[in-house]
Image (spheres, rainbow, N blue to C red):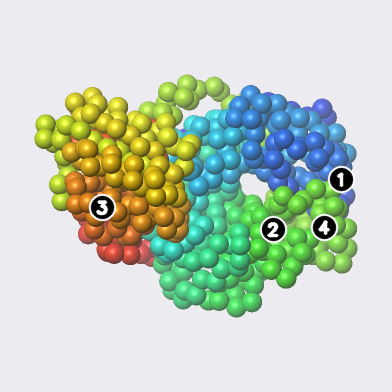
């Protein structure tokens, strides 16, 4: 299935989502302050939007990243309409970029609070390896964004996750295969673009090999130029070739590319590599400039100026960006910002906003039914048997099951889907929802559940590279009972390497009702596990039959 872009209406000046009280000013009439203001994108929680009213009406911000709403898409649309009405009151009247971190999976939970449906993780999509499903899911995600009045999605994550200890990417990545990550990233971008959404692929030139978190420190990736070119560049090269609308930079130092500055502040990387060598013509967004990987010995204002001079167009200035920070950045224009950089970036932003205004008004689709059907198909196609001694387990020989989940409480209703499948096969099932960090009493209850069942499903839960030591201890005690067990990796598949004694292991790359059901069907043999392990685990090589694992020559 191929997603075709919607044809623009030539006579439409402003779309329904960007309606303003007056026609925007011409680019040539904009003042230097207004041009710099268009480059600034502030971050806000939905319940404190009023604090940004003066910033937006004064033209000090050209965009906002919204998070943590009321869990209602209707309320989110009211908020975005209000924000756009404030922008319309500015002298120039340009509409806002309104962004959300809608990249999929449980690692970034904020979009759910805006009323947006939960996407499968990118790693689940990588394991399923069905680009058409990925494109359609992101198209339907774009439909929801459009309905909510959001026109920018900080997605997809185009990082090739090669470091099992990567603390920030993990299941946010499509996997470790460069070509597969490239293909799936392009599918996601095409889906969002077809829905009229600006897709911002991240984090250029690739953060998948980092072993520290740029939110907390500045990572260094000490790979050779050849390693970067063959493994981490391919997704961004393909996106540049296909005229993707935007990419986001990484707050990571790459000595092979620039020995002094991380990508966000490197002219060699953003201008020399991305613009000139890869010939990327879209917008360049900085990652949030209040992250430790960006600030270091810089203030947020200094970081914004350095990123702009290096080649960034849109400066995500973060949570601390109320009136003071944008004003400070703008006031530094005369002596700090390169005039040609401001002109280039403001022009790109202005032109993209005019293109947004000329797109078709979005047509409602039966998104929920289709979204759920594709999510269920992805779950069935991504479930992966990592290790197997006894799988599948015959319901005729295993009539009772214990399902133990060490996941956050918000997933309790999802794991129950396993019981529904088991019960339908005549397997009496007991669920025990433990916490991520179980104590002694929880462990004892889990052991009692295991001892009274023919087989036990142990749901391990790990965010990226870390898990609770208490969870590991509890799972190892369960495995030491030598009962028939299936280790079910609920989020990051890297956690399966912690339990080599688990003879049966299944990975689902993110817990939701569809993935839980698919796991149960795999365990009892109703469906065949179709997923291809999308990453290299520390205790095993790539599967010999997996496609897409060759280094790109692009």
- Read off the residue under disc 1: 29
Q: Nearer the viewer, mark 1 or mark 4?
A: 4
Circle 2 sits in a helix, a strand or a loop, which is it? loop
Measured Cα–Cα span from mark 3 to mark 1: 70 Å
Q: Nearer the viewer, mark 4 or mark 2?
A: 2
Percent of width and height locating residue 537: 32, 61
The answer to which of marks 4 and 3 sits earlier in the sequence is 4
The numbered dot on residue 479 is 3
Q: Is residue 46 above or below residue 313?
A: above
Measured Cα–Cα span from mark 2 to mark 3: 45 Å
- Read off the residue under disc 2: 289
Identified at 25% across, 52% down, the residue is 479
Q: Are marks 1 and 2 in contact (CB under 8 Å)?
A: no
Q: Is residue 463 above or below residue 398?
A: below
> Pointer 4: residues within 10 angstroms few (<14), some, or many (20+)?
many
Identified at 85% across, 52% down, the residue is 324
For the C terminus, the image quarter is bottom left
Percent of width and height locating residue 190: 49, 41
Q: Are marks 4 and 2 in contact (CB under 8 Å)?
A: no
Q: Are marks 3 and 1 in contact (CB under 8 Å)?
A: no
Q: Are marks 2 and 3 in contact (CB under 8 Å)?
A: no
Q: Are marks 4 and 3 in contact (CB under 8 Å)?
A: no
- Read off the residue under disc 4: 329
Q: Nearer the viewer, residue 309 or 427?
A: 427
């Amino acid at each position: 299935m191929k997603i075709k872009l919607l044809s623009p209406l030539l006579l439409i000046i402003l779309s329904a989502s960007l309606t303003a009280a007056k026609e925007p000013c011409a680019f040539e009439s904009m003042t230097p302050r207004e041009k710099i203001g268009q480059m600034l994108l502030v971050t806000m929680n939905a319940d404190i939007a009023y604090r940004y009213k003066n910033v937006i009406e004064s033209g000090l911000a050209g965009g906002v990243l919204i998070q943590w709403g009321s869990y209602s898409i209707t309320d989110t649309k009211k908020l975005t309409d209000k924000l756009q009405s404030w922008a319309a009151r500015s002298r120039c009247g340009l509409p806002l970029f309104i962004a959300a971190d809608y990249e999929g999976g449980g690692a970034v939970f904020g979009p759910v609070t805006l009323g947006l449906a939960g996407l499968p993780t990118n790693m689940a999509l990588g394991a399923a390896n069905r680009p058409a499903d990925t494109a359609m899911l992101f198209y339907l995600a774009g439909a929801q964004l459009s309905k909510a009045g959001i026109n920018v999605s900080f997605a997809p994550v185009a990082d090739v996750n090669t470091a099992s200890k990567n603390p920030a990417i993990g299941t946010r990545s499509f996997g470790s295969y460069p070509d597969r990550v490239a293909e799936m990233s392009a599918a996601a971008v095409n889906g969002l673009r077809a829905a009229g959404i600006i897709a911002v692929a991240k984090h250029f030139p690739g953060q998948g090999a980092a072993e520290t978190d740029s939110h907390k420190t500045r990572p260094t990736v000490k790979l050779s130029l050849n390693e970067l070119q063959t493994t981490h560049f391919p997704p961004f090269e393909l996106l540049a070739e296909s005229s993707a609308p935007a990419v986001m930079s990484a707050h990571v130092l790459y000595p092979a590319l620039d020995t002094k500055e991380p990508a966000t502040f490197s002219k060699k990387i953003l201008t020399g590599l991305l613009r000139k060598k890869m010939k990327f013509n879209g917008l360049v967004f900085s990652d949030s400039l209040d992250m430790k990987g960006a600030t270091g010995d810089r203030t947020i204002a200094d970081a914004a100026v350095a990123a702009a001079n290096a080649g960034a167009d849109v400066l995500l200035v973060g949570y601390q960006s109320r009136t003071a920070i944008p004003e400070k950045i703008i006031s530094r224009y005369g002596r700090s910002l390169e005039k040609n950089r401001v002109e280039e970036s403001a022009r790109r932003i202005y032109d993209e906003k005019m293109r947004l205004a000329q797109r078709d008004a979005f047509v409602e689709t039966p998104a929920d039914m289709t979204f759920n059907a594709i999510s269920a198909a992805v779950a069935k196609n991504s479930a992966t048997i990592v290790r197997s001694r006894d799988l599948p387990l015959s319901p005729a020989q295993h009539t009772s099951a214990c399902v133990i989940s060490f996941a956050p409480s918000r997933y309790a209703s999802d794991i129950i889907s396993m019981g529904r499948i088991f019960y339908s096969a005549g397997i009496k099932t007991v669920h025990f929802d433990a916490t991520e960090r179980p104590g002694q009493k929880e462990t004892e209850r889990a052991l009692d559940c295991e001892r009274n069942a023919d087989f036990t499903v142990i749901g391990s839960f790990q965010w990226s590279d870390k898990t609770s030591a208490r969870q590991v201890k509890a799972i190892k005690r369960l495995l030491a009972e030598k009962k028939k067990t299936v280790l079910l990796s609920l989020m990051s598949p890297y956690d399966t390497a912690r339990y080599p004694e688990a003879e049966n292991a299944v990975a689902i790359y993110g817990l939701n009702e569809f993935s839980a059901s698919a796991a149960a069907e795999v365990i009892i043999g109703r469906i065949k596990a179709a997923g291809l392990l999308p990453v290299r685990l520390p205790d095993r090589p790539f599967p010999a039959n997996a496609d897409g694992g060759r280094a790109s020559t692009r």
